């Protein structure tokens, strides 16, 4: 049964793992992997601390191991050749990096089984593993190069270590739990809440707060926590000024915006909606509530199991409702739901068959969503379709204006060099990545003279024009002066308006359009971008927004 759950979990997480490639439409994926690949060239300092560093080191180690294997098999002759292969086609490395999430997501099912065995019978543990295998948001997020799915695994392992602290109370158990909690914190800052079950384990062991303070084991666990974090994410401490700056920026994005929008503890309702409506489904969520009620009389057992999810949900109640942030909760939701299912089966005298039926019923909704998103991942994104059209119909070197987050095109070598010189002063001041791209021989083709529609950023390879300012110009001078012939637009909803699009439509002609929607869609239908917190809908046939390409020369070619 456990092997069956693991196999199902692996299938759901690896199915569609190469979605979009060689294009990468989630900006977090590219920024995380590129930062990881930059490590080791001159320093292990990532120079960016929106997240701690351990996940970056893991990805760098995976890439390093892949290079060693590729070199041993004769696929590449040198590190330079390996880097060139990535710049020409990054598919292989992105697939490997995503596999880290898929593998850890699959292993979490095993960890959930072990966690549930501390709570109840083997049948209860099987139910928990099955529920975790199909939970929608963990399945979806296992397809991306992100921290959240690996963090969920290590948090469960920390809670299992806290159980050993409670039940056995040996020095090595405390040290082991502290080291694991420090490793979790080094994976993601929000995993600091993993210290709560460790502290609760010590409290349950000593049975008094005074006993915790006077006992050396909790202090050893605290020292182990600090040592693990310092060793696994050292530059957070060494480069603390930058780290504090980036942590403050991340806090504003995740916590500050949530508090400003929903008030203190107000976003908890939004997270519950995501859990019930998508991640766990109605049946699993209701069963989890029953499980909490059923476990509360157990006292110490409930305190140990609920310590992390209770503390973490308080954090989520003040965090922006991103579904990916909820990943560490789902292992506990699965265990609690299994406990609720088996409690109901006993109370209603349904027996083993009844527990199996209830488990399958709770699996139905998230499994349907998981299968739908996997099928979605295997369908070409609208941005991929649009890129193929451009490469077939638009001559290389043509000027094209594109918004951020849309069709990914290759800039010509000349335009990239001009842009870098404009942004940083000289080519030799560009990042190592862009210097390597410029040195490619042969250079990727076809390339285009790209102008970006946006309000700017720190990108060395982009020149931005403000779309609001361009829309007010009746002749689109800012675009024409840059030699722009084609303008690309993307819309997330069918009825979305865009002043610049309206201006371009009055001067040019529509030459290409691809939509993710089918005949059932209405003006308010919303496109399904794979990492958006939108459950799969019947009116959307493929990922990506509506893409339109307009030719500023009415007569065409």
Image: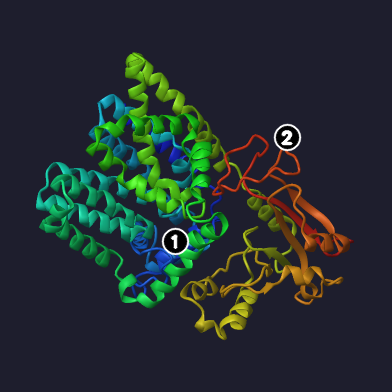
Q: Position of residue 518 (x, y in %)?
A: 72, 37
Q: Quadrant of residue 347?
A: top left
Q: Earlier in the sequence, mark 2 or mark 1?
A: 1
Instruction: Please indicate, yes or no, whether residue 187 appears anywhere in the rendered image.
Output: yes
Which element carries disc 1, helix, strand or loop? helix
Q: Position of residue 313 (x, y in %)?
A: 41, 48
Q: Residue furthest right?
A: 555
Residue at image coords 36%, 21%: 344
Establish if 437 lies above or below 335.
Answer: below
Residue at image coords 25%, 29%: 120
| Lateral position of residue 271 relative to residue 382, left or right | left
Residue at image coords 64%, 49%: 544
Q: Quadrant of residue 519?
A: top right
Quadrant for the C terminus in the image: bottom right
**Label 2 with label 1: CB-CB less than 8 Å:** no
| Lateral position of residue 458 relative to residue 464, left or right | left
Residue carrying label 1: 33
Quadrant for the N terminus in the image: top left
Residue at image coords 71%, 48%: 493
Number of the label disc, if any, that sits on residue 305: none
Q: Nearer the viewer, residue 539 or 374?
A: 539
Which element carries disc 2, helix, strand or loop? loop
Q: Position of residue 508 (x, y in %)?
A: 85, 61
Q: Nearer the viewer, residue 255 or 406?
A: 255
Establish if 427 lies above or below 11.
Answer: below
Residue carrying label 2: 520
Instruction: Please indicate, yes or no, whether residue 58 appears anywhere in the rendered image.
Output: no
User: Within 10 angstroms of label 1, few (less than 14), some, or many (20 or more) residues?
Assistant: many
């Amino acid at each position: 049964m456990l092997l069956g759950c693991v196999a199902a979990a692996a299938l759901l997480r690896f199915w569609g793992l190469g979605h979009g490639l060689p294009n990468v439409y989630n900006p977090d994926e590219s920024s995380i992997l590129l930062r990881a690949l930059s490590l080791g060239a001159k320093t292990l300092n990532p120079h960016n601390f929106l997240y701690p560093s351990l996940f970056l080191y893991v990805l760098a180690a995976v890439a390093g191991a892949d290079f060693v294997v590729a070199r041993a098999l004769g696929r590449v002759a040198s590190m330079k050749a390996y880097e060139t292969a990535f710049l020409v086609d990054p598919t292989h490395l992105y697939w490997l990096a995503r596999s880290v999430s898929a593998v850890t997501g699959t292993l979490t099912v095993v960890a959930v089984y072990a966690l549930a065995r501390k709570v109840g019978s083997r049948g209860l543990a099987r139910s928990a593993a099955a529920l975790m295998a199909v939970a929608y948001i963990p399945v979806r997020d296992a397809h991306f190069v992100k921290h959240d799915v690996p963090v969920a695994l290590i948090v469960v392992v920390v809670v299992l270590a806290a159980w050993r602290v409670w039940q056995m109370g040996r020095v090595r158990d405390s040290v082991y739990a502290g080291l694991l909690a420090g490793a979790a914190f080094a994976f993601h800052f929000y995993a600091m809440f993993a210290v709560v079950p460790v502290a609760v384990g010590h409290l349950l062991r000593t049975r008094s707060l005074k006993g915790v303070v006077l006992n050396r084991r909790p202090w050893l666990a605290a020292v182990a926590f600090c040592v693990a974090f310092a060793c696994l994410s050292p530059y957070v401490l060494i480069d603390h000024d930058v780290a504090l700056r980036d942590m403050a920026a991340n806090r504003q994005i995740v916590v500050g915006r949530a508090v400003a929008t929903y008030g203190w503890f107000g976003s908890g309702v939004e997270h519950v909606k995501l859990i019930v409506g998508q991640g766990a489904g109605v049946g699993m969520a209701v069963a989890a509530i029953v499980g909490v009620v059923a476990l509360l009389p157990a006292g110490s057992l409930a305190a140990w199991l609920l310590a992390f999810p209770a503390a973490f949900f308080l954090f989520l109640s003040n965090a922006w409702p991103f579904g990916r942030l909820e990943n560490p909760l789902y292992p506990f939701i699965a265990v609690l739901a299994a406990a609720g299912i088996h409690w109901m089966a006993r109370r209603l005298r349904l027996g083993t068959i009844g527990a199996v039926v209830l488990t399958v019923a709770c699996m139905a909704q998230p499994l349907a969503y998981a299968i739908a998103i996997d099928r979605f991942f295997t369908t070409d994104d609208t941005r991929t379709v649009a890129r193929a059209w451009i490469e077939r119909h638009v001559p290389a070197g043509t000027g094209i204006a594109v918004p951020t987050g849309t069709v990914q095109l290759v800039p010509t070598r000349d335009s990239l060099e001009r842009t870098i010189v404009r942004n940083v002063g000289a080519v030799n001041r560009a990042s190592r990545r862009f210097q390597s791209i410029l040195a490619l021989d042969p250079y990727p083709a076809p390339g285009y003279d790209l102008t970006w529609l946006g309000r700017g950023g720190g990108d060395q390879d982009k020149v931005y024009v403000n779309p609001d300012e361009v829309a007010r110009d009746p002749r689109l001078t800012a675009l024409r002066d840059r030699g722009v012939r084609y303008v690309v637009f993307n819309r997330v909803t069918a009825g979305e308006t865009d002043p610049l699009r309206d201006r371009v439509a009055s001067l040019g002609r529509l030459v290409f359009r691809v939509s993710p929607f089918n005949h059932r869609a209405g003006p308010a239908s919303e496109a399904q971008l794979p990492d958006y917190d939108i459950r799969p809908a019947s009116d959307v046939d493929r990922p990506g927004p509506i893409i339109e390409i307009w030719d500023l020369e009415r007569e065409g070619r």
